[in-house]
Amino acid sequence: MSTRDTRFERSIGIEVPLVCGPMYPCSNPELVAAVSEAGGIGIVQPLSLVFVHGYNFREGMEFILSQTDRPIGLNVITEKSSKAYQDRMEKYVDISLEMGVRFFITSLGNPKWVVDKAHAKGGIVYHDVTEAKWAKKAVDAGVDGLIAVNKRAGGHAGHLGMEELFKELSVFDKPVLCAGGIADGSGFRRALDIGYAGVQMGTRFIATDECKAHPDYKQAIINSDADDIVHSERITGVPVAVINTPSIQRIGTKASPLARWMLRGHKTKHWMRMAYTVRALWDLKRSLQRPMSSKDFWQAGKSVEAIQKIVPSASVVEECRKQLNNGLSATG
């Protein structure tokens, strides 16, 4: 029998331990539903659903659930922000639970309130972490598993490698998903062999038929190599992995001296992050929908090196399913 950690897929009722990671602005409803329908699990990114793709939250969820009867998840960014933002996120969680969603991915802040709401309804919460100190806080808050964001990830990447990060997080005796640098079946298999309970992919799912990203964005992913991914502080105030487009080359990747000073302050860092976030929401939305321009920045991870063409999202899930089955046959 296989000794692979199957707690993740067993707990949420999916066939393949593969997550289509939440992506602002790329998580459109069709993509979320397609990955779940194929046997993995798609994650709703609520700001993407409402602000980018124009849905009322409840109506957007209803549309996704009309496309698949399999589990979907919800991303909740729990970083301290305004009361209006907190109220909105709590409303989204409540609606999701009411509609049968039982898997939640939390990011950037204390997940305790999400854990409490989810556990009261039999739900499961996994938290994004980049190192052990954040994992401990999440475990203390009661999360059911961890998503290990390594240095090859897109978006807010970590600073540790895949194996190094797994070793650091394995002490918590929680199922751990690998996030970063994986875009194909062989990478998926390698993560499982290391000991990960599953894999979260983001960049690979942007270059799929169902994703509504502009064709120029998808082509940039196909054309890029790992060395074309750089980390910019000028989008959200903390390093974000992006493709090194002419726009990024023009503005540079370092925050201004004033921004860096404000980001170091206990109170001013929240103001500065909010200012960055408001601007980034608009800029990323525009970049998703238009041809490449001198103002674009496109998030992507180093897994671009394994992406050669645009494919249906179901084929990504199926490639991982085959690797999963091969591994079970080899150890059974």
Image (spheres, rainbow, N blue to C red):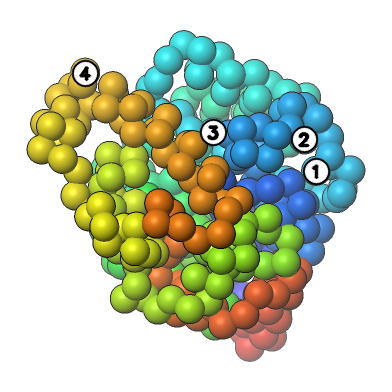
Q: CA distance from mark 1 to mark 3?
A: 17 Å
Looking at the rendered structure, the secondary structure element under dot 1 is helix
| Label 2 sits on residue | 61
Q: Is residue 163 left or right of residue 285?
A: left
Residue 256 falls in which quadrant of the image?
Answer: top left
Looking at the rendered structure, the secondary structure element under dot 3 is strand
Dot 3 alpha-carbon crowd within 10 angstroms: few under 14, some 14 to 19, many 20 or more? many
The label on residue 64 is 1
Furthest residue toward top: 83
Label 2–label 1 contact, CB within 8 A: yes
Q: Mark 1 or mark 3, which has the lower sequence index?
A: 1
| Label 3 sits on residue | 76
The label on residue 267 is 4
**Residue at the image position 74 percent from the left and 46 percent from the top:** 29
Q: Is residue 320 left or right of residue 312?
A: left
Q: Mark 4 or mark 1, which has the lower sequence index?
A: 1
Looking at the rendered structure, the secondary structure element under dot 4 is loop
Q: Mark 2 or mark 3, which has the lower sequence index?
A: 2
116 or 213: nearer the viewer: 213
Q: Mark 4 or mark 2, which has the lower sequence index?
A: 2
Q: CA distance from mark 4 to mark 1?
A: 38 Å
Furthest residue toward front: 294
The label on residue 103 is none
Looking at the rendered structure, the kind of residue marked 1 is Ile
